Amino acid sequence: MRQLELQTDKMLAHVEDGVGWITFNQPNKRNAVSFAMWRAIPEIIDDFASSEDVRVVVLKGAGDKAFVSGADISEFEEVRSTPEQIAIYEAATGGASAALKSLEKPLIAMIRGFCIGGGMAIALTADLRISADDGQFGVPAAKLGLGYGYGGIKELMNLVGPSFAKEIFFTGGRFSASDAETMGLANRVVTVDELEATVTALARTIADNAPMTVKAAKAAVNEGTKNPDERDLDRVAAMVEACFNSEDYKEGRRAFMEKRKPQFQGR
């Protein structure tokens, strides 16, 4: 196991069996994300993105109460009260979101308890969301008078469609894990006791597959969610061609013929 050394102990990151684990570690505040935590996320993603020992990344919250309950509002007076501070804070949150979205490797959100507001925005950056049956989802912007930009709403709409997106934002309410599964917000819901084993097995299954194929598939789906005039289909085509020219494609064919498990190297 490889442990990352970070500037804050409120974020934890380690690598094990091809899986990079990121833990929001402020359970006493239901893993509300502080300024230091926002700033740590790009550092972790940079490491995982460039490391050959990481094939897939999992996001999780510490403890049993929450994935992430939102931003740590208790520190706003100290770090987000002047125009200068607000600009710095917004740069940190934007940088964290951009880092998560830019990751070309599969990203899984493992969700227990509260996944609210900023926590749901973090979960939306993941490719897959697996929730325990105690999951609670919501965006309470309408209860706080906040404006919510087009980008965030479109990401949600890409998953759940226009009608459910409107219900989530119009009501500002909380939705159960079962609701989230019905909407398509959660890929699947399992019991609390099954959650970690389910996510670990899923992550390791993906980690054992051909990394270049998985990367190309993620790129193709992501391009498909963009407006037609914004899609870079040439990039996707080049990634697909690279798969056919790779050593992994040769290994996959050999393993199939030899009736054994392939050992993919990502090249």
Image: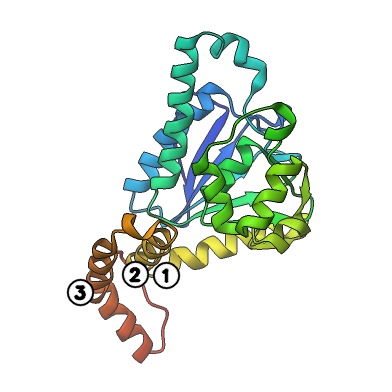
Residue 196 in view (yes/no)? no
- Residue occupying image coordinates x 42% and y 32%: 95
Q: Name the residue at the bottom extreme.
A: 257
Instruction: Quickly name the residue at label 2.
Output: 264
Residue 261, picture quadrant: bottom left
Q: Residues within 10 Å of mark 1 (few under 14, many from 20)?
A: some
Q: Earlier in the sequence, mark 1 or mark 3?
A: 1
Instruction: Quickly name the residue at label 1.
Output: 209
Nearest the eye: 191 or 129: 129
Q: Residues within 10 Å of mark 2 (few under 14, many from 20)?
A: some
The numbered dot on residue 245 is 3
> Identity of the amino acid at label 3?
Asn
Query: Is the residue under label 3 in contact with that under label 1 (CB below 8 Å)?
Result: no
- Residue occupying image coordinates x 52% and y 8%: 82
The tally of labels here is 3
Q: How crowded is mark 3: few (under 14 residues within 10 Å), some or many (20 or more)?
A: few
Nearest the eye: 23 or 254: 23
Q: Distance between the residues labelled 1 and 2?
A: 7 Å
